[in-house]
Image: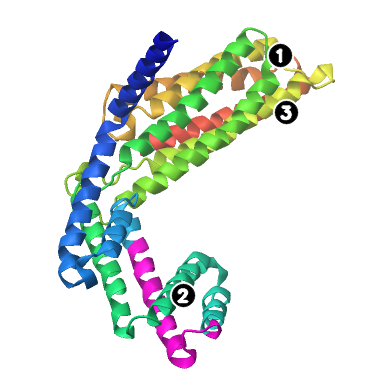
Amino acid sequence: MPERVMVAAVGAVRHLVQRIRGERPGHAVHGAKALIAALFAWAVAAPWSPGHGPYLAVAMALLMVNASTVYQSVTKAAQSVVAKLAGLVLALATAWLFGATAGSVAVIAIIAVLGGPRRTTDDRLQIASTAVIALAATATAPMGSLVAPVLQTLTGAVAGIAVNALVLPPLYVDESEAAVRAVAHDIGTLLHDMGDGLAERNLTAKAHTWLHRARTLEKRLTHAEERLRQADESLRWNARCVAHARRKDVTYGEAFRILRGATLQVRGIARTLADNAHDHHADHHLGQQFLDRYAETLGLAGAAVKEFVEPGVMAGSSSAARDRLRGAIDSVLDWHDTMTDLIGRGTLTKPGAWYVYGSLMTDVERLLADLDYADAR
């Protein structure tokens, strides 16, 4: 039994050490910034704080320095300071009119909680809580002493914002790039898998699986969109933008918009294939000659989507990645022209499925047109 306990303890320690090693750089930066902000706020606010305990200033500094972006730290600080000032004014007004009584609490609740637009619910609750605390303080302390907490809050906010903005301010460009690449990888992989499935005569067996995967791409898009929004926000009022001038305009928003359109086309292809696979009219089924050619087209299109998010392409530089993208697009366009010609001459079998041919060809054509347009730009 002791040996088992020892083995389990050693395993837990190893797991903890590995986790710390993997997360150490980010945690070390956050810890250092939090320590600097706390000491800075304490040093500034302690000399004039009652009892020399500026705990509100330190708390506010820690809150602001841990904001995900400099922009958020500024906006949150402004909202918090304004809310506390409003709560203090409300408390002083009600205490002057009604004293520290239940009537004052009722007035605060009506004004702060029920008044104003509903979109500011959090701010109004903060105003109400600040007002109630300040009202309780007026029963045992002069009203003038209530100004100190507000000043501590303001001092802590300034200290936290300053440290967050000047000491390695957060920047999320790499995260947005990774999210956009993940979307492209999923799209390209799905196109490649559909091509392999058609080549292996697995349309009926796998069509609905492809459709399900195409629909779940929306989750990837939502995640990538959030990362892009965070990256754009992190560039606002960020001192590191001076050192990252080359990256300032590269948050991959244009690539994301192209991939969003590609997702719609892939869903259209998957939906058309799924509908056709279970169409009970034999004349509407796609000819195998078309499917064989279309399978190769999908494989090439998947490669083109993956090449589209290579670093050289996304950065707009002339590189081997751009050449590979250009080659992939040209290859698919060649196949597109060949199949269009075969359909036009009536060479392909199953003429009753002409509208299905058109739908599948149109979706691929639009996908390639978006990639081609982005590449030309």
| Residue to which mark 1 is pinned | 205
Of pointers 3 and 1, the one earlier in the residue sequence? 1
Residue 163, by quadrant, is bottom left
Q: What residue type is disc 3 on?
A: Tyr
Q: CA distance from mark 3 to mark 2?
A: 70 Å
Residue 218 point in image, percent of width and height: 56, 37
Q: Secondary structure at mark 2?
A: helix
Q: Secondary structure at mark 3?
A: helix
| Residue to which mark 2 is pinned | 132
Q: What residue type is disc 1 on?
A: Ala
* Front residue (pair 254, 289): 254
Q: Which mark is residue 355?
A: 3
Q: CA distance from mark 1 to mark 2?
A: 66 Å
Magenta residue span: 75-103
Q: Residue at x 68, y 20 (%)?
A: 207
Judge whether residue 315 can be spotted in this image: yes
Q: Which residue is farthest front?
A: 2
Q: What residue type is disc 2 on?
A: Val
Q: Any magenta on residue 335?
A: no
Q: Any magenta on residue 87?
A: yes
Q: Main secondary structure of the magenta part?
A: helix
